[in-house]
Image (cartoon, rainbow, N blue to C red):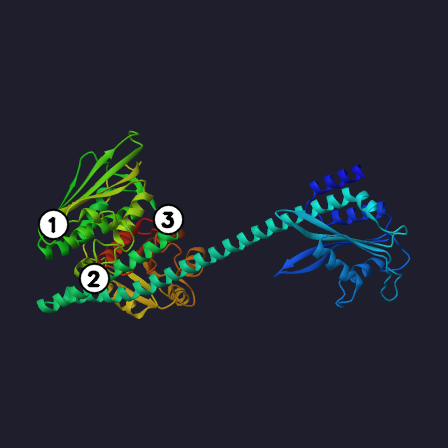
Amino acid sequence: MIGTVSRLQADFILAPESETILDVTLQEILKFSESELGLIAEVLEEGGNSSILALAAASNSDRTAGAEAEFRQSFFDQIEESPATQMAYAAIKTGERIISSDAFRRPGLPPINPLIVVPLKQRTETIATIAFLALANRPAGYDQTLIDLIQPLTTACTHFLIARRGEKQKLAALDDARQAKEAAIRANHAKSTFLANMSHELRTRLNAIIGFSNLLFSGESDPSKKENLRIVATAGQDLLRLIQQILDLSKIEAGKVQEEITDFAASDVLNSVVSMFQPQVEAKGIKISVRIYPSVPTFIRGDHGSLRQVLINIIGNAVKFTTKGEIKISLLVAENPNSDKQWKLLFQVSDSGIGIKPENIERIFSMFEQEDASMTKRFGGTGLGLAIAKRLVEMMGGEIWVESVSGIGSRFSFTIKAEMSEHRGGAIEVPWSAGTVSSGKRILVVEDDLFSQSLITQILRGVGYEFECAEDGSTALSVLQRGVFDLVLMDIQLPVLSGIEAFRIIRENPDEGWDPAIPVIALTAYALRGSRERFMEEGFSAYISKPIDADELLKTINEILQNDRVSTASVTIS
């Protein structure tokens, strides 16, 4: 008996998920108990009610075909007076073995007599019946002596069932976790798709509002009308920044912000951001100055997109809350621990604005928080700018803090970690004049939004470019086959055939009548972080996000055409 149990335990260790271990155990019990029929059934508890599930049935008899199956079925009769069923539920309820010497039979089968039902119990805080063993037709009958004899086998069987149930629960938990993870991934994907689509739709409309306002502004001589157009364009830019903040926040919260590591000049990023706010600074009659210390390396390697966004948020706040005086911006080296390998740069933005009360300093870096509710009414904003800046600075390995005196002004400081760039040369500036364009240059504009199409063609017409339009990717391919063009402006989200699909066809099919190396600029309202890398890795010559700035568009086109054929990333406007 001991050897049999040891062998069964060894088999179970090797294959704990195997269903055959119970069949083998039941056969051993039949052999030692000299019984003709046997059954092992699991007890399932649900909603306070017990039900049984047959796991293994066996027979030592070949007298009647199907005896094993019929014995099993006798415990699952729907007829309440079935003796086997009544005995099973009595054993489950009481936790005690039950023996019957009253013969009963199913049609076409020999009598079942005697019958014993032995509950198999698990000891926890209470003793619970997890299964039962049923044996029948032992010539010598059943008694406690036999129960004691086969106890090592019934104990082993109980352990197998407990382990089996635990394994099932573990697998069920893993399956639940897998399904929850898949659901979260689907939800994240749906959210990202929604954000991308919302970004595209909102920026496409703003492209028309801001673009046409700027076009009208440049051609208007009446001061009153110019002021009205400036207000429209400024409101459009404010709305664009608000949309971008909400999208940035959603990406950060979802952990979807991707670093855009490139070689760049930190001073160039700083100066370009300052130039964005120059019109507002001049309109308010305040001064803004920038000091870049000589120790700052010319080029660094890091996430220029995050740095730019942080500077926009902090300098934008300084301009917003400063009504008189001056804004001073400085860039210096805070720490250079690893010689030429790694740098810690310090940016400081000081203003003579309204300042911050000491008790409110910690709050301003929290989501949707401003110093007090009156700030929103007086200055506007969402309270997201500094919270986003803090997250982005931390992602760049730095920290951000503020020193402020209410009524006097504030100084915001933040650090970033960056590697020394291997690029040692100076930036290559391409001479640019919007008033002069090489004659005869033809551009294919692929854009389905009629407002955007009209805006782009007016910009191109204004400087002398020839152009033709297509409203989807498929039409664009047909136009390329029958005409000669020097450059393609390709919107990404197009009907029939998307911009990316059309671009791939152009590059991969050199024998279709078009130039497969023709420069293609991606025009897109997708402006979520990581979009630029995705399009540039695809092989577009440049990437321009909407709303389109006329000067940036024309400068990009001019640089690419001057470089003749550009098939990979060389110019990026973001």
Q: What residue does disc 2 label?
A: 463
Compute the Cα span from label 1 to label 2. Answer: 49 Å
- Work out whether 560 lies above or below 400: below
Which one is earlier in the sequence, the residue at label 1 or at label 3? Answer: 3
Q: What residue does disc 3 label?
A: 258
Residue 63: give x, y in percent of width and height. 91, 57
Residue closer to the observer: 156 or 57: 156
Residue sitting at x 26%, y 39%: 299
Q: Residues within 10 Å of mark 2 (few under 14, many from 20)?
A: some
Q: What residue does disc 1 label?
A: 407
Q: Is 18 placed left or right of 213 in the picture?
A: right
Compute the Cα span from label 3 to label 2. Answer: 37 Å
Residue 342: give x, y in percent of width and height. 30, 34
Q: Amino acid at mark 3?
A: Gln
Asked whether the viewer can see residue 458, the reply is no
Q: Is 309 placed left or right of 533 in the picture?
A: left
Residue closer to the observer: 171 or 518: 171
Residue sitting at x 74%, y 58%: 90
Q: Amino acid at mark 1?
A: Gly
